[in-house]
Amino acid sequence: MCAAVNASTDFAQRCEPAQVARPSADVAFGVVSELPRRITTLRGRTDFDRLYSTGRRRRIGGLIVISAPALSDPGRVAFVASRKVGGAVARNRAKRRMREAFASVVPNAAADVVYTAGTSVLSAPFDQLVLWMKDANRV
């Protein structure tokens, strides 16, 4: 915001932004000891068709987990929420919650996995969702 101006000041001086002392990200949030691991995602219809036709299905809590042996070296993962979960906002929220819960779990590197959200993914406590993810990756 520009300060009050008298006629003798030029534009650059009168519209300088106020300098705000902000802590650095290291101070405000703590130093991150390691970079987050990159998740390789499933893409393409052929990958999904292979998983849906040959994969093993199981229901764990509010998740439906479909897994098959990985074709590539690191296993890949996909997060799916159908319209049964709700509108676009609810589906995106369910997928965000599953991705965040998955980040706290060590994934099975030898499998391609599709996690499908049920309606209870939205209402379940986050700790319960993490337990479901751990159970899904154990088998």
Image (tube, helix red, strand yellow):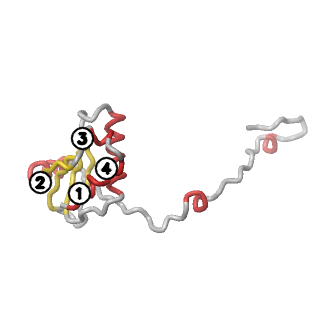
Crowding around mark 1 (Cα neighbors within 10 Å: few <14, some 14 to 19, many 20+) is few
Q: Which residue is mark 2?
A: 56
Q: Which residue is mark 1?
A: 135
Comes first in the chain, label 2 or label 1: 2
Q: Is residue 1 left or right of residue 54?
A: right
Secondary structure of the residue carrying tag 3 is loop
- Residue at 55 percent of width and 62 percent of height: 30
**Vertical placement of 36 versus 48: above or below?**
below
Crowding around mark 3 (Cα neighbors within 10 Å: few <14, some 14 to 19, many 20+) is many
Which of pointers 1 and 3 indicates the residue nearer the eye? Answer: 1
**Vertical placement of 33 versus 23: above or below?**
below
Q: Which residue is mark 3?
A: 118
Which of pointers 3 and 4 indicates the residue nearer the eye? Answer: 4
Residue type, label 3: Gly
Q: Is residue 26 left or right of residue 60?
A: right
Secondary structure of the residue carrying tag 4 is helix
Comes first in the chain, label 3 or label 4: 3
Secondary structure of the residue carrying tag 2 is strand
Q: Which residue is mark 4?
A: 128
Q: Are marks 2 and 1 in contact (CB under 8 Å)?
A: no
Q: Give the x, y percent position of residue 131.
A: 29, 54
Comes first in the chain, label 2 or label 3: 2
Q: Which mark is residue 93?
A: none
- Residue at 15 percent of width and 50 percent of height: 58
Crowding around mark 4 (Cα neighbors within 10 Å: few <14, some 14 to 19, many 20+) is some
Q: Give the x, y percent position of residue 85.
A: 27, 35
Q: Are marks 2 and 3 in contact (CB under 8 Å)?
A: no
Q: Are marks 2 and 4 in contact (CB under 8 Å)?
A: no
Secondary structure of the residue carrying tag 1 is helix
